[in-house]
Amino acid sequence: MTKIAFKLSTCVAATALAVGVAAPLAAQDALNIAWVHSNAAAQSEQRVKAGFEDWLSDKGYDWDVSFLDSQGSGEATASNLQDAVSRGVDAIIITMSDLRASKAAIDVAVEAGVPVFSVDSGYIDGVQVDITTNNWAMSADVSPYLLDQLGGAGNLIFFRMAEHHGTRKRGDVMEKVLQEYGDVKVLAEHNIDYTAFFEDTTSTMQDYVARFGEDIDAVWAPWDEPAQATINVMKAAGLSDVKVIGIDGHPQAVAEVCKPDSMMIATVSQPFEGMGAQIGDWITAIVGEGKAREDVIPSDIVYMDAPLVTKQNCKDFM
C-alpha cells in the first residue's frame, strides 16, 4: 500500500448524509480517502488516478489518500475494502472492479457509514454511484467496425475477460455481433487472466501464432493492453496482415492506430482522467459539504462519452 498526501487550502463542512455516510466533518478537516485498485498495473486505473490527483492539485486540497492494490484478485479487493472500513476512512473509491464479488464488503462499509464511490466497477446497491462509459455501446461501435474492415469474412482470434463487468459486456456484444457475420470464423477464444493480463495474453497469442500462423486475419481484444500484447507477438513472428482492435484509447494505443502500417486499426477513447476528477467533485459535495446524494448525482450509473478512434480520426485524440 502506498500513501500520498495532498495540500489543502480550504475544506468544507459536512453533515450526516444519505446512504452509507458517517458523521459530519468539521470545516477545517482534511478528508481521509482509501482508494482500492482492482489492478494498479492497468493503464485505465493509472489514468483515473492521475485525473483525480490533478483535480486535487488544482483544488489545493489536503486530502490523505491511501492506495491499495488488489492485483487483479477479487478476494483481495474485498479484503482491501474491509481494511479501509476498519481504518475509519471518510470515503472509499474503488476502480475497475466487479462489485458483485465484493457485495459483503460493500455492506460492511454501508453499515459503518463509509460512502463508496465506484469507477467503472458496475453499480450495486450500497455504492453512491458508478461512473463509467457504456461498455455495450463501445463494443457495438468497434466490433462491427473490425468485421466490416475484414470484408465480413476471415479468421478471428477472440480474447475476452469475464471477471470485470465492462470487459464482460464488451465480449458479450461481440458474441452477438458475430452471429450476423456467418463468414467470420473464430479460430480460438481465450478468457484473459487479469492477475497477469499482459503476460497471459502474450503467452496465449504465442500459442495461437504457432498453431494458426498466417491464417489469422483479425484479433478482437477487450482493451488496449492485450491488443498491444498480441501485436508484439505477431510482429516478432513476422505477421503483418492482421487487423486488431482494442478499447480504452490509451495514448500508446491511439499512437499505434495512427501508424499507417500498424495492425491496430481502432480503439475507443475513454475519458478516464475525467472520471477521476468527477469523483473528486462528488466526494467534495457529499462528504465534505454534506449535500444529499440525490441532489448531487443524477443517477446510480453515470455514463461518459467514448468515441470510436480509427486511422481516419486518430489525430484528433493525440
Image: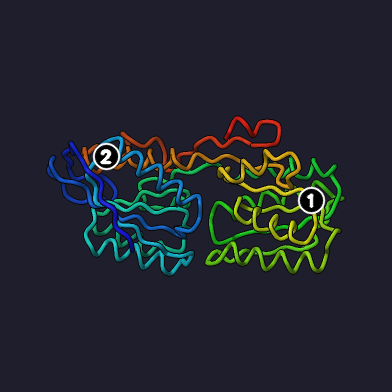
Q: Which residue is pictured at 67% across the width and 38% down the height? A: 258
Q: Which residue is pictured at 43% across the width and 69% down the height? A: 75
Tag in front: 1 or 2: 1
Q: Earlier in the sequence, mark 1 or mark 2?
A: 1
Q: Quadrant of residue 157?
A: bottom right
CA distance for labels 1 and 2: 47 Å
What's the residue type where badge 1 is placed?
Val
The picture places residue 246, in percent across and down from the top left corner, at 65, 48
User: Which residue is the site of mark 1?
Assistant: 242
User: Which residue is the site of mark 2?
Assistant: 284
Badge 2 element: helix
Q: What label does residue 97 carry, if any?
A: none
Q: Quadrant of the C terminus?
A: top right
Tell me if residue 236 comes above or below residue 32 in the rendering: below
Q: Nearer the viewer, residue 43 or 33?
A: 43
How many badges with numbers are in the image? Answer: 2
Crowding around mark 1 (Cα neighbors within 10 Å: few <14, some 14 to 19, many 20+) is: many
The picture places residue 44, in percent across and down from the top left corner, at 50, 49
Q: Nearer the viewer, residue 114 or 142?
A: 142
Q: Nearer the viewer, residue 106 or 205?
A: 205
Q: Quadrant of the N terminus?
A: bottom left
What's the residue type where badge 2 is placed?
Thr
